[in-house]
Amino acid sequence: MQSSDNRCPRRRFLTDVMAAGTIATGLAPLAAAAGMSVAPGKKNMSPIRNEDFYKDGKFLVEKAKDAYFSMMRRFGYPISPRLQKEMWAIDFELGDFAKVGMAGIIWYNDKATAVFGHDIYLLPGQMIAEHAHEKTVDGPPKREAWLVRNGWICTFAEGAAQEGTCPVELPRSQTNFITAHRWKQLKEGETDALARATAKHFMIAGPEGAIVTEFGTYHDGNGLRFTNTAVKF
């Protein structure tokens, strides 16, 4: 005679899943006690302070990288040897890293096929300085689309701000250099893209910070145009 589990594979599957979940829940405190890593919760980070990332007016790049790696661990984002070696962190040489800064890694950038892949890392409340992409001798203006992996962001595009309260704060240091006012909140798994080539744009992370994957066409740094001409990239 067949068992009831064999007659109802869906019931058996659900029973197995429930049992696995119970075991996993019970193992979590045991793993922690044994010194094993357990994926942390996605809690808001404490606001970062400029004074923690500068010494005698010099930007402390390695300390900034440590802050991004800490955020990645909190999100459970993999920190590969290549990422550790190639990730860069910048303050756009504006001296306001707590509000205007980013880290990133270019995973792929090929002029022949015009394919580009980039991960963007933003600490809580950080803004990527407003910019646009112009054509260069090596290619047309770069096009971009973004996928939020962790946390959430607001993208800003050309046009007037819509009704409603924007959920992020615009850095005071950039007040005179912001021309893209139409914002859109993107949560995990949501996407947005440039409406047209050469459009001015930027993004700001929410209180968790954010990890964003950018899909784009070939990136030529010579085509970058920042609204704030004091920016260096």
Image (cartoon, helix red, strand yellow):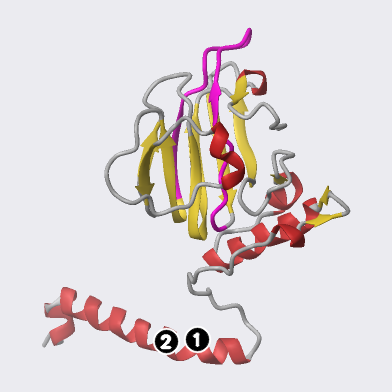
Res 162 → quadrant? top left
Near mark 1 (Cα within 10 A), the count class, few <14, some 14-19 or many ≥20, is some
Is the N terminus in the top left, top right, bottom left or bottom right quadrant? bottom left
Q: Secondary structure at mark 1?
A: helix
The label shown at residue 25 is 2
Residue depicted at x 49% and y 88%: 27
Is the C terminus in the top left, top right, bottom left or bottom right quadrant? top right
44 or 164: which is nearer to us?
164
Residue depicted at x 51% and y 54%: 210
Residue 71 colored in magenta in the image: no
The label shown at residue 28 is 1
Q: Main secondary structure of the magenta part?
A: loop
Res 182 → quadrant? top left
Residue depicted at x 66% and y 86%: 35
Asked if residue 232 is positioned above or below residue 14 in the image, the reply reads: above
**What kind of residue is marked 1?**
Ala
Instruction: Work out how far the residue at label 1 is from the one at label 2, CA to CA, in angstroms.
Output: 6 Å
**Is there a contact, CB below 8 Å, between mark 1 and mark 2?**
yes
The label shown at residue 190 is none
Near mark 2 (Cα within 10 A), the count class, few <14, some 14-19 or many ≥20, is few
18 or 77: which is nearer to us?
77
**What kind of residue is marked 2?**
Thr
108 or 157: which is nearer to us?
157
Q: Is residue 94 left or right of residue 16?
A: right
Residue 25 location in percent, x, y? 42, 86
Asked if residue 191 is positioned above or below residue 73 in the image, the reply reads: above
Residue 144 colored in magenta in the image: yes
Question: Which segment did they paint magenta?
Answer: 124-148
Residue depicted at x 81% and y 53%: 60
Q: Secondary structure at mark 2?
A: helix
Residue 153 location in percent, x, y? 44, 50
